[in-house]
Amino acid sequence: MQYNVAVIGSGPGGYVAAIRCAQLGFKTAIIEKYDTLGGTCLNVGCIPSKALLDSSEHFITAKNHFAEHGIDIPAPKVNITQMIKRKSDVVKANVDGIAFLMKKNKIDVLTGVGSFVDKNTIKVTAADGKESVITTERVIIATGSKPTPLPFASFDKKRIISSTEALELKEVPKHMIVIGGGVIGMELGSVYARLGSKVTVVEFLDSLIPTMDGSLGKELLKVTKKLGMEFFLGHKVTSVQNSGNEVTVKAESKDGKVVELKGDYCLVSIGRKPYTDGLGLDKIGIETVKGQIPVDEHLKTKVDNIYAIGDVVKGAMLAHKAEEEGTFVAEQFAGQKPHVHYLLIPGVVYTWPEVASVGYTEEQLKTDGKAYKVGNFPYKALGRARASMDTDGFVKILADKQTDEILGVHIIGARAADMIAAGVTAMEFRASAEDVSRMSHAHPTYMEAVKEACLAATANRPIHL
């Protein structure tokens, strides 16, 4: 065999798997159909969206809060061309970094569509049609996912757009209609709301970010309304029509009332679906189930030398989940005994304030009949938050009623995305709320809100509330 391991797909799952395989001494190749590495996350997902989120947050801070800080400047203006350019520069730096890591770890990069000839042979077809063939002992499928269109309104990439096109707009929309109040819809909706767009969100369910703790969705609704965002929760979209320079969206509430919205762009963000096109799975006898590749607890498919990770298998479609799975599979190849604790893979929404969550939600604990207690602490009672004028949000700790073990950590507030790692650490080591409450937390910091919430969960004894 030419290679010990071939990885198909170079997103966070694929490139991490390839690096870990190389570190463990396996001769490794990575196959990527695009000219740049990094997959959706680095090119048209996580990284560029965060770049625009930061730019838009800087703009609205300068516009609304600089004067209060004693910084007098002329009224700032949005330069969308420069924002998109900076975003592209950030993307390039990151994907160039991945290319460097491939060279550093002596991983062969093969550009083209990888498809199975048999379980040990992969054909790589370049964009110009040129074909090459490699042989490999093992294969890791890490081909990721793509945006899901509405069944009655496909992406025209002009007015009816996915997140990919929303990251490349050449103008600030006058009115952006967002279908889907999940992570992607709320992040990109908030970007353009800050830049001056009217943003209307239509969500089928009764709450925003519905996969997270219900209290987080309620708070996010409240704080994003301050940006002027408009919401139609519990509404089913029935039609989307592009008439040239305008998109008309019709939606129906549960009681049958019809809402008609008109905007210049419609962002469809109802989810993503696994991407397995062109793999030739039929050549090796693998059938997808609801688009996903079935795997066992070792992430092995029905074919003994082929594994699958990330968005193409069950579980949350998160870059860091894919990374953990890539490492997990590579280390198994080396005879190690790794594990992935799926309950402790955090979820984050990069709005401002940020939203972050790990462990059980309160709704899950109620459904499971688990006896629990709750500790809450609001940012408005936090000295650091008052100093930075970031007083929206709270920390919520869920703990076992008998043992005090932390069962869930849910944060909405400034720097929640970074703070949630402390919750993951505590839960990985099965800490109690009292354990965390007795640890020294630097003052003044946002993390003090976690300590105070743990004090509230321990015996309802927060100090600063």
Image (spheres, grey):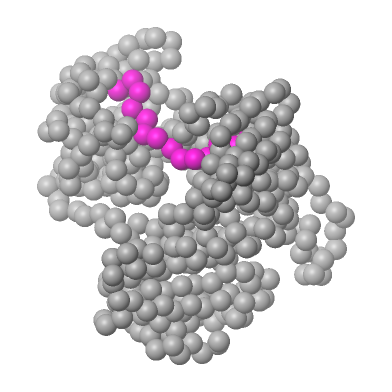
Q: Is 60 on the left or on the right of 439, as rendered?
A: right
- Figure check: 179 above or below 133: below
Residue 37 sits in quarter: top left
* Residue occupying image coordinates x 26% and y 33%: 289
Who's the residue at 18% across and 35% down the image? 301
* Depth check, front residue: 124 or 312: 312
Residue occupying the point 70% across, 56% down: 227
Inspect the magenta stretch and tell me whether residue 278 lies in it.
yes
- Does residue 415 show up? no
Is residue 240 among what the camera can see?
yes
Q: Which quadrant does the C terminus fall into?
A: bottom right
Residue 73 rendering spot, x and y as whole percentages:
85, 58
Q: How many marks?
A: 0
Percent x, y of residue 155: 55, 27
Question: Which residue is at 25% across, 54% downward?
Answer: 340
Assess whether residue 270 is covered by the magenta stretch: yes
- Per the rendered image, the range of residues in magenta is 266-279
Screen quadrant of the N terminus: top left
Nearest the viewer among 114 and 288 is 288
Q: Is residue 425 left or right of residue 57?
A: left
Q: Residue furthest right?
A: 74
